[in-house]
Image (spheres, grey):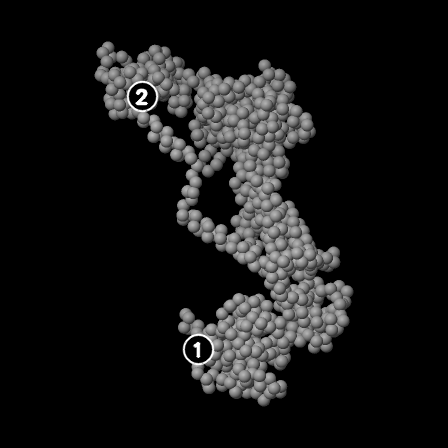
Amino acid sequence: MIGSPRVRRRVRAERPRRGGAPLALLVPGLIGLVFLVLPLIGLLIRAPWSDLGSQLGSTEVREALKLSLFTATAATGIVLVLGVPLAWLLARTDFPGRRLVRALVTLPLVLPPVVGGVALLLVLGRRGIVGEWLDDTFGYTLPFTTTGVIVAEAFVAMPFLVISVEGALRAADPRYEEAAATLGASRWTAFRRVTLPLIAPGVAAGAVLAWARALGEFGATITFAGNFPGKTQTMPLAVYLALETDPEAAIVLSLVLLAVSVLILAGLRERWMTTS
Amino acid sequence: MGAIGTVRAGRAIMATLLAGAMVTLAACGGDDDGKKDEKATKAAPQTPGSTPAADTKPLKGTVTVFAAASLTETFTALGKQFEAAHPGVTVKFNYGGSSALAASINQGAPADVFASADEKNMKLVTDGKSADGTPTAFAKNTLQIAVAPGNPKNVKSLADLKQDGLKVAQCAPQVPCGAAAKTALDAGGVKFTPSTLEQDVKAALTKLTLGEVDAALVYRTDVKAAGAKVVGVDFPESAQAVNTYPIVPLAKAPNADAAKAFVAFVLAEPGRTALTAAGFQAP
Amino acid sequence: MTGLETALDTAPDAAPGLDAHLVVARDAFRLDVHLTAAPGEVVALLGPNGAGKTTALRALAGLTPLGGGHTRLAGVDLEDPGRRRYTPPERRPVGVVFQDYLLFPHLSALDNVAFGLRCQGVGRREARVAAAEWLERVGLAEHTGVKPGRLSGGQAQRVALARALATHPRLLLLDEPLAALDARTRVETRATLRRHLADFDGVAVVITHDPLDAMVLADRLTVIEAGRAVQDGTPAEVARHPRTDYVARLVGLNLYRGTASPGGVELAAGQRLVVAELPDAAEVFVAFPPSAVTLYRSRPDGSPRNLWQVEVDGMELHGDTVRVELTGPVPLLADVTPLAVAELELAPGRPVWAAVKATEARAYPA
């Protein structure tokens, strides 16, 4: 007799709680979702779907899409090769002025991309500090080249990866690296065989963010690399210029960019974003 | 704070007004204004110059002007003069690409006046039934080849842009300066591959001032605005690609009287003088 | 036996086992402990939380650099800050079983064990074969492909042990090897660990705060408190002759320090404790079990010699006896039956008389 209510209480406590989200979170959360999704729906509704085929068929769009995918992927590669070690330095070593360095690393996040492009020109441009030397020594200039696009995209995308990886490194237990050391692993081996696999989800998330940022990059690209079809005209540049004359075409181009990125991101998520 | 600021601004405007009036007096009898003024008189009171405020009931409120980016310096100065001539009025500007401005006007943006950098975008507004009356041309702009001071690459003509290794910035064909450049190049039968097709004329000029390109095909007004940083090279083909700037008060203008007065102000003096000083040609 | 062989293998002047003087200063804390052990010997570092046990382990592994002293292992100077000598962890023949094992979660049990061998340059296949043998030795032949997340606590502990032993270290460090296990697993694992440690031919150092683990696993105990070694000896010696309140409490004894006087010991509080036998020393410890204390409601007849009026301070049930904490001229722990608690009407604050049998009080030199 006494036992039964107690049993019932336990059963109730063990039942998973459903619909228990407090209103104070639910309402702003849903508003936030609508706020994010509504403009996309607007694009979908107003899109001239009949133009889609002809737009996709045009050489300029295919060139821009190809260039966008190529440069964003190449930029992500650069960002990975340079950004992961940078994140490691920030998370695992102690050096004077580290806080300042971290602030500097995140600077491209707050810098208007156009300013970033000008800054890149001042360094890597034909009259830039480094660029002048490049031009004099090798006769090579970065602006107005596809490499220039990749450089601009890597510049704006790098902070996303560094922040994500540094966070993952800080969350990962550094004692795993110590355990590896006691087993005879050098710091490099420990990083490669223990730390990197442990923070792989963080690296993947950072790489995806960086890729997405690079794909949508406009300001730094057009400022640093200019705009020339097939060479430096990525999708966002094509969209912007299409807006000047044919807003409907711009919508279609945006949707193409959206669709391709959603497909790729969803595919990646399936493959290696699933954290076990 | 605000009050003091206003007083200071007021003084500045007075000074500008005095200077403007003197220029006006000097320019009044000037050469080629007679014909165009007939058009202007439709919207503006009879006498051009500093008197329009006196003979109508005083204007009030804010007049919002959507103007092409290339008009920034000229119109900002004109706005101050207009405010000084009409003490009850505040002029607000929204500068941008003509197509973007036209699009937002057609979407119902609360603007009183639209000044476009080309007739194509003005047509979007008139087609959209957003204009009040017929637009009037108030300025012309032509292209120049902008080069670094001293013209180190010795660019003398459009054909010189074909030089090997010469980097040229051009506007994208979708924007007015690019369309004009294309027309001029076609007219001259000149074919070359520019390094970049910039999204607007200022960006093309910036590439030149930063030294990334050796030449840029830009408007004469932009060369003038850049001062000593660049020099302009005239070329005959530019005559084939003249850009005409039309202005119109808007149908849904919240302040229709002030809108008409501002258009008249631009079409007559001191608008003419200011535009000429900025490198525009009379239409 | 094994230790002798190792000793013969190495240079005659080199100590074959561990010879360490660990000095680490950090903030207000200072560790200063001598630690020596012969090959094949298992030494337990026993101490309360914050005593510096883990710091000592990290110093031995090279994870925390020494501020002074030295670490010599199998005749090799691993570390000597005075001579600017430091060997990083990856180049020390030291294996560590961490408290929470730190098995690499992304690697299978087999790859975890093979990790150290791979780092030593052993080929992939060879390392995996050796790792499989180790897993078999710890009874996990069936679990080679399992990721650590799917292992039970006891299994994970054994994988960690196999991983540490697979590299054939000369020094095996175990940090609270049984602390993360539940009571039942603990008993089994303690026994198997004892067996594996007995088979190990290097020096083993077990860090623990559990006296039972220390007693069962170790050949020798070093008790450290506040960064210093306070007692050293075989488990039996330490259990019989505790030298600090911490050790006395661990082994469940009443402990006092005093000066020997004929027939008894003068305690610090001006009390006198009569003992049956006195050692030949002026300063002595006296220890007796709580079961040697008898409690009375009123002053007993015949007046036994070691008798004090005390007050009950607290009570705790230990198995089928009740441990009573008493305050008074001499603080005491007494073990009584629950029946006695009822009969004596014991409750905190209640005054009682406590007598200690002189025959059960052992005195030994301080």
* Subunit ID for the residue under disc 1: B
Q: Position of residue A248 (x, y in %)?
A: 60, 61
Q: Amino acid at mark 1?
A: Lys
SS under mark 2: strand
Q: Amino acid at mark 2?
A: Val
In the figure, is residue C304 to the left or right of A31?
left
Q: Which residue is mark 1?
A: B60
Q: Visible in this render: residue B228?
A: no
Q: Are marks 2 and 1 on the same chain?
A: no
In front of the other: A1 or A33: A1
Outermost residue toward the front in this view: A50
Q: Residues within 10 Å of mark 2 (few under 14, many from 20)?
A: many
Query: Residue at left 51%, top 68%?
Result: B108
* Subunit ID for the residue under disc 2: C
Residue C324: give its label. Answer: 2
Task: Give above or below for C130 relative to A175.
Answer: above
Q: Position of residue C20 (x, y in %)?
A: 54, 27
In which image quadrant can residue C316 be found? top left
Quadrant in the picture for the N terminus of chain A:
top left
In which image quadrant can residue C7 be found? top right
* For the residues bearing labels 2 and 1, Cβ distance under 8 angstroms: no
Q: Residues within 10 Å of mark 1 (few under 14, many from 20)?
A: some
Task: Give above or below for C345 relative to A15.
Answer: above
